[in-house]
Structures are given as structure tokens and as C-alpha cells.
Image (spheres, rainbow, N blue to C red):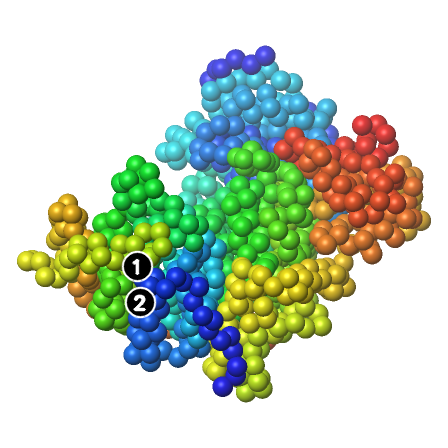
Amino acid sequence: MTTPAVRNPPLSAATGGEATTPAQELSDLSVMIGGQGGDGTLTVSDLLGRYFRKRGLYVYTSRNVLSRIRGGHADASIRASRDPIASVKSQVDVLVAFDNEAIEIGKAELAPHGFVLYDSTTFHSELPNSAGFPFATLVGGPLGQPIFKNTAAYGALSVLFGFDPVQTRLVIEERFKRRSPEALEKNLKALEIGRKVALEDPRVGQRFSVAEGDARDLILTTGNQAVALGFVVGGGRFFAGYPITPATEIMEYLQRYLPAFGGIVRQAEDELAAINMVIGASYTGSRVMTSTSGPGLSLMTEGIGHAGTAELPIVVADCQRVGPSTGEPTRNEQSDLSHLANLGHGEYPRFILAPATPEDAFDLTVEALNLAERWRLPVILLLDQALCQNTATCRRFELSNVRVDRGKRLGGDAAQGLAQYKVYQFTDDGVSPFAPPGTPGLWSEVTGNEHDEWGHVSVNPVNRVRMMQKRMEKMVRARNELPPCRLFGPSEARIGFVGFGNTSGPILEAMRILESRGIGTRYLQARTLYPVPVHEIEPFLAGLDVCYVVEHNYTGQLARLLRETMPAQHAKLRSTLKYDGTSFRAPEIVAAATGGA
Amino acid sequence: MVQSAKPVPPIWCPGCGDFGVLAAVKKAAANQKISVHDLVLVGGIGCSGSIHNFLEVNGIHALHGRLLAQAVGVKLANPSLTVVAAGGDGDGYAIGMGHFIHAFKKNASILYIVMNNETYGLTKGQASPTSQLGFEGNVEPPFHAMLTALSIPAPNFIARTFSGDPKTMTAVLEEALRFNREGRGFAFVEDLSPCVTYNDTYKLWREKVLDVSKLPGYDPTDRKTMFRLCLETIEQGRIPIGVMHRPKEPGHDGLEAKLVGDRPGPARADIALAPNLASYQKLLSGLT
């Protein structure tokens, strides 16, 4: 269908700008930009995102990259909508291709009205509804480097979508003003080159027009950035980690943010060191966190158990990816839940919190720090690749909701009011008051050995039972302090969804589609996954005829937890599963819920 | 004084070399006038790693092989604390080897004492990374920590002592603690600490130890010379002890100083919302 060929664009083509058909208005659109890694596909997505945000639209971007620095197919997708969306659109309206492979991959998702804009420097496509321009050579001559082809493609897109020229240019200025004046100038020139060839080509014209939205005063961010900011604001001051996709950005953001607040970020020699550095720092009373993904989590497992029995507060952000082993580092999955619920050898308490959106990730990171210190145990922040790395519009992060609860932390003058200091003192709620080393007049022993109240090694059976109960009952006593689930949809609906993490966007969108067909549904977004909030989920399930448990794994890990803890609801639960590495599209959930899967 | 965790009697066999280390640590800390509440002792897993239970001290009983990572975490989060990590040769040179190498590179101002008895005593006498050829069927050549330590170009304090000479050991530990407390970086002291039950080497080691400071050309500021003296001593069938490295220029090279400077560090930062509110607002206003 396609043949490699160098084609010259009809630069002389009259005045241009006249669409062959009237512009089609889009209020929910999707652009996919594909090429080789290093082609600058993400830049095009970023520029479009900035423009759409200026037009008051909700934006969601995702990327499909291989785990390599350069080369290999890479694509970025951007969706913009007047409605709140946080998911990938199932069809692509415009495909931008920097090579033929991008067309071969992208055309499967192209809408019937979809248009393909491609760089014809090295190939030619016979696809209908397409236009090719040799962006690389067009910019390579005047600007000296072909790399500006992505900005030229943005210029051509601005014609295709009928963007406002002033705003289009402003986006370039905002994006590149922090780089060198030369970079800004060259990108502005590339923009004009792209606009000019598109304006002069009758194949392009203004095919689409983009509706304006009213989504103002929102931010465009990722779950990883939200976790990093939540950590700072929640009083986190010590972070140690090891680079691993898709968690690395948390460490990188913190390297940028934390030093200004007197905090420390260390890239450790491995995950074993990272978790143990964090444990050491926790003993000093600092609020601490590490972030990782599947393989790193496996290495950290012994350390997390140590923190659980030594009663040292830590937060571990698990950015799930396709596993096991190296799996698919850049792809989305939610398959660590069963592992985390039963994490490690032996038994110890832990809380697992799962945010669904960046703003939820910000709030729950703060809450994780509070809960870890209040209850003196490990708290897992369960994230997934799509939440971690896809960008989404969301409300500004609210400081008014932030509180710093230091639990039973004793002050520097603790010794004055105490006759004795037992670091593992038995108390009504199982939490012992804590005074960090350096508190004048007292000291403490913490250990992963079973211990008595003083922290001395003990194998006394009576003590063992009391200590186990002290620790394990935290999961019962804390129940009402754990982040509550969120409920959506009319209470009278008899069809329900349960999910966590990034499935929230597609589920909410599916509910709107179903509602438009007269099918009312409810959705429980679980934010605490462990201990399972039976007191919230059971009444929800009780009001339903059927509940679809939506998750990204093969075995239905959340559904299994629900069946185990709420056996009476067993028959109502249906698993809606996806484990191909990509996130749910709303129509897939609609199909599952209407039996059309 | 608040009643805090009281030391318990050591679990060690009578005559164990670790008693020498316990006494020397106690004396060196007292001589350096380190307050109990400012001293943190991180113990590894093994006989030697239980040392923190036998002292009035803040103690962490770490995971096997992870004591250095935990000790570095303590020091970075609160640089005002004096941090000592203590464990055995299996803990440090087998399961913990990755952290051992990186501790020199990191150069946080902590003291690491390895009580080397050339065996896994607590699990009843298996060969360890430092075991001699033939010990319990060992066919792997012994690991020499001094040679490895000297091969890493970082401004560390490196020394080796012998439990049969507690006086020298106390002096070396005191110098190491002083080095730490001046914020100069990582101090590593390997003590030859015989296991009287599974590898009683007192007599042999007493005959074989050689104080390298007695050798012609001894210069602990010169890495190359010290590596050669160490290697030659080993090749002659002797056991080198003494101060192996001491950086030439006094300076503040500790990792903690590079990271926090004059600030109090993470543990003592004020994390209440009110005093930070303006900075947080500024940080969040950067999002668009």
C-alpha cells in the first residue's frame, strides 16, 4: 500500500486553506503521534495539550514507548474533550506519522472520518484522507537540523484543526522560552514552515474545528508528580530509591523539590539499600518514602516486613507495571495487589491505599505519611503505570485539606514527663509513644527480632501472643481512620462497578455512555484496598444485582479479595479484566456490562 | 534519668573476641564523651550483631547484611547523631557486600566495625568469605577487606585491629569516632575477633599479626604504599593490622555535610504546615 519515496509538497499551490469538505466540529477528539523513539512525538503531544488547555478543554495524554533510549516505535496519544475525561479515546481522529510503521500501527485505531498527516521524507502513503509533507527536509534546509520536524507537524495540525494562529504561536513561546533564544527562534520558524505548507495544500484545509470548553483553572499533571508533591507537603523529608520504570519520576521530582525544604533524596545502589536507608531514616523520626515497581518491590519485601515488626513508619509507592520479572516495564497492569495484601514472610500489619487520579494521589500520599506515623507501620501507595505516567487535567492540589498528624510522637522534652521509656509499650490502641534517638535522657532498641516492650529479644510465648495482637489489631482499630471509598452514580441503580487506580477514568466514562442508553449504574472507587473496607463495600454490593470488578490483571485479584472477605456477595461479582498492557477504553467496559464483550 | 532499655548479658561464648570489641566501644565512646542518647548502634545479624543489646545505647537490630544501609539512613536523616554499625564477616562481606563497597563511595560519617572470625559462628561454623582454604571444605580463597577498602579512592579512615590487643583497639576506635564526629566521612575498622568455639585462632593470630606501622615506608596517607605493604604482608603468610588509611588533609568530606550543609537534616526539619505554607503554595503554583 505504501512505497518509500521522496515527494515534494506543492508549495506553489495557490492560496490554499479551503477545505474540501466543511469543517467537522469535534468536542471530544484524539490525536495519535507515532514515529521512532527520538522523533519528538511527545513534544507534539505536549504542544497540542498546551493549546487545548488554553481552549478550556479537559486533556488526557498517554504514551507507548519501548524500554530503550532511542529508536523503536514510539507513539503518544492526546485526547481533548469538553467533558471531564481521564482515559484514552477508543478511536483516533488524527494520526500524525513520522514513519510508515506509525501508519501501520495507528491506522487500526483510526476513526472512519480520521485523517493522517505524515512526514513524507522517506515514504509515501496511498491512504485516503491523508497528506504527506517532507517535514524533515523542509526544516532541515533553513534550520540546519531535521529535528524541528515535530514542531512543523504541529504547525500543519494547527491548520487542520483551524487553531487560532496567535494562540498557536503562544504555545511555542511558552514551551521554548526557557530554552535558548535560538531554540525558540528555530521552533517558531519550524511552526511557520508547517503552517505554510498545510495552508497551501488543498488536501489539508480546515477539516476539523475544535469546540471550546469551560475547564479553566485546572492543572495538567501525572500521578508521579502528584505523589512527589504530596510527599513534600505531607512533611516527607527523606527519600531513597533506585531507578525503575514507571516509578523513576517520583525520585526525579523529589530531587528537584526536596532539598529546598532541608530534605534528602538518595539514589541507592539497589532496592535493598533504598528500603533499608529509609528504615534507618524512619528511626530518627523523619517522614520517609521509597518508590519502586514490581521487581524492586520483590527486593524490598524483606525490608517492608522488618518495618512492620520493628514498628517503624514507612511509605512505599508501588508503581505497578506488567509483570512478573522484567515483564513490560512501560506498560500498564494492576497485578501486585495479591502480593501486597500478603506481602512477605510472617504476618504484620500494613495499609494499602490506591489513588485513582493525580489529585487523589496527592491527597493519599499526605494521608499515607500520616497513617504510617500514627499507626507506626508500612503504608503502601498502590499506583499503576497509567496513573503514574499519563497526564490528566485535574483540580489544583489543595493545601487546605492537608494536615500533618504526628500521632504519638513525643517531643524533645519527653524525658521530663516519663518514669520509663518503652519503645514497644503495650497501649489500648497498640501504638506505642515514640521518642527518636537524640531525645535527651532516654534511648531505645528497635529490632526485627520478636521483642518485649523494651525492645529486648524475646521468645516468651505469652509475650509473642501479646506482641502479635498489638501489631495485627492495628488493622482493625484503624478502620475508621482509613481513606473512605468514593461512590458515583444513582443509589437506586442495580448494576455496579468496583475498581481502583487508573480504571476510574474509563469506568466513569462508561457510566455516562450507559446512562445515555438509559442504563443507570453505580461505581465504588476503592481507595483503601487493605485491610479490605468491608464496612463500605458490603452495603454497596448488597444494593446491587450484579457488580463488575474492573481490574488490569489475569486472575481478578481484587475480586478474589472481595470474595474472600465478603463470601455472601460471591454470586454478584463478575470480573472485567484486561491484561494486554494497555488501559481500558470506555466502550470495552460498556460492552462487558451489557454482555456484549 | 528515664528508665530506658537496660543492657542484657551478652550471648557470646566465654572468651569470644567480641567481648574485646564491646569493651573497646564502651571505652572509646566514654572517652569521646558521647551522650548515650546521641549514640546509635546498628547491629547486623550474627553473634557480633547483637552487640547493641549489651550496651546502654540507641540500637537497631537490622536485617542480615543491611546494617550499613540502615546506618547511613540514620546518619543522613539526623547528622547530629553518632552512628556505629557493627556486624560480622558473613553479614558484611557475603550477604551485605554490595552495601560494603558503596559505603566507602558514599562516605557518610559513620563507623563500621566488622568482627571477623572467619566463620559463621551463630549457625555453627560454616565457611565464611574470609575463611582460609580448607576450612570446613572451603575451596574459595579468602577475601581481604583491607585490600578492597584500599582500592576504593575515597577519603575514608581504614584500620584493622586484633581482639588480643584491646588497648590498641580502643585507641583506633577512638580515632575512628573522632574522624566521624568531625564529619570527615566513613571509618571502617575490621577487628580480628576469634570464635573460640568454631574457629579458635587466638594463638595462630597472635603469632601472625604484623603491625604495618612498624614496616619501612609506612605512610597511611599514601594508598599505593599501603596496598603494597598489605599485599606483601599477606603474601609472606602474615596478617597485617594497624591504621591502613587516613586522608592527608583534614576536611569535611562526609556525605551528610554535602547534602544538608549547616541545616539540621530531615529528622529535625520543621514539617508543620503553617511555617511551610508559603513555600508550599509557591511550589504548587508552578503547576499549569
- The answer to which of B102 and B39 lies nearer the viewer is B39
The residue sitting at the left extreme is: B216
Residue A375 in view: no
**Which residue is found at the position 48% from the left and 25% from the top?**
A134
Helix, strand or loop status at disc 1: loop
Q: Which mark is residue B20?
A: 2
Output the chain of dot 1.
Answer: B
Quadrant containing the N terminus of chain A is top right
**Which residue is found at the position 48% from the left and 15% from the top?**
A5
Q: Is residue A523 above or below residue A142?
A: below
The image quarter in which residue A97 lies? top right
Residue for badge 1: B193
**Which residue is found at the position 48% from the left and 62% from the top?**
B61
Dot 1 amino acid type: Ser
Dot 2 amino acid type: Gly
User: Residue B247 location, x and y as percent?
Assistant: 20, 62
